[in-house]
Image (cartoon, rainbow, N blue to C red):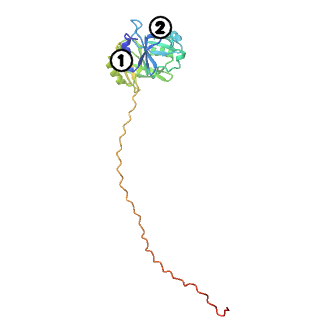
Amino acid sequence: MTTDTKSAANFYTKLAGWKTKAFDQNPSYTMFAAKGRPLAGLMALPEPNSPLTWLAYIGTPNVDETARQAEGLGGKVLKKPTDIPTVGRFTIIQDPQGALFVAFTPLQSMQGSPPSGVDDYPWHELTTTDWRGALAFYKSLFGWEETESMDMGPEMGTYQMFGWKGHNLGGMMNKPRQSPGPPAWLSYIKVADSKKAAATIKKLGGQIINGPMEVPDGSWIVAGLDLQGAAFAVNSPKPSAKKKPRTAKPARRAAAPKAVKKKAVKKKAPARKAKPVKKRKPAGKKRKRAGSKK
């Protein structure tokens, strides 16, 4: 929700590579999309005193039941459950500490389509006045689970992470005293390279509040303000390890020809002279034996 939709559309399409399209049911509402899928929306502030902010949508099986339960847990329903034609049903809720969010149930026909989520917004962060109370509220409302935590020092305090069904979703922390504005959710937009995104933010006239910086899981983040003053953040995945270039192996030297052993050639004995063949006398008539008769 912003004061200048045209300027905001130009800023985020160049920053995140999104495309814009007017919503069929309401042309004044602009859809941000990537790879043919809607990822976010853009609209003018509904009232002059409305907060200049991004609103996180949290899925729920039954919006009406979630709204009733939120009020029972100390939250406040700012917009009663309402249908969005061809899309679903939503309600705007303020948690006990003052942060706004949208509870949303898509129509049955849309529930099989790929949702925006971990891939498009890898992290969701709540800065609040009482993270323990906020975590108890969201755990009861959506079944979120308390996961890891880390100490960020005496000024920042504890950073508590949360998830759902084994998937890490984000973190919560108490808002630093010098940080302006009320408690709020901040969804991190996935980009290819946070360092390049930081340069783009400066070029477009936005303001960088924090980063680029590497976080414990190896990814890189940048937090900033767009041209109208709305807070946003980007996240790029951990860079893959660069493969070392293969060094060319030196060409093998031609092997010296091996000495070929000559086989000893046996000298042939000199041919013997053929012995002269004695000629046989031609056979003559047999001699008559003595005393023989004719």
CA distance separating discs 1 and 2: 28 Å
Q: Is residue 27 visible?
A: yes
Nearest the camera: 89 or 269? 269
The disc placed on residue 224 is 1
Q: Is residue 121 above or below residue 50?
A: below
Q: Is residue 62 left or right of residue 194?
A: right
| Residue 125: x %, y % from top left | 42, 18
Quarter containing the N terminus: top left
Q: Residue furthest top?
A: 48
The answer to which quarter of the image holds residue 246 is top left
In percent of the image, x 34 and y 21: which residue is there? 200
Nearest the camera: 43 or 242? 43
| Residue 172: x %, y % from top left | 43, 18
| Residue 152: x %, y % from top left | 38, 21
In the rendered structure, which amino acid carries the disc numbered 1? Gly
Circle nearer the N terminus (1, 2): 2
Count of marks overlaid on the render: 2
Q: Is residue 79 left or right of residue 12?
A: right
Q: Is residue 286 left or right of residue 110?
A: right
Label 1: few (<14), some or many (≥20) within 10 Å?
many
Q: Secondary structure at mark 1?
A: strand
Label 2: few (<14), some or many (≥20) within 10 Å?
few
Q: Is residue 154 visible?
A: no
In the rendered structure, which amino acid carries the disc numbered 2? Lys
The disc placed on residue 79 is 2
| Residue 175: x %, y % from top left | 38, 15
Nearest the camera: 5 or 61? 5
Q: Residue furthest front?
A: 294
Q: Is residue 47 above or below residue 131?
A: above
In percent of the image, x 53 and y 14: which residue is there? 107
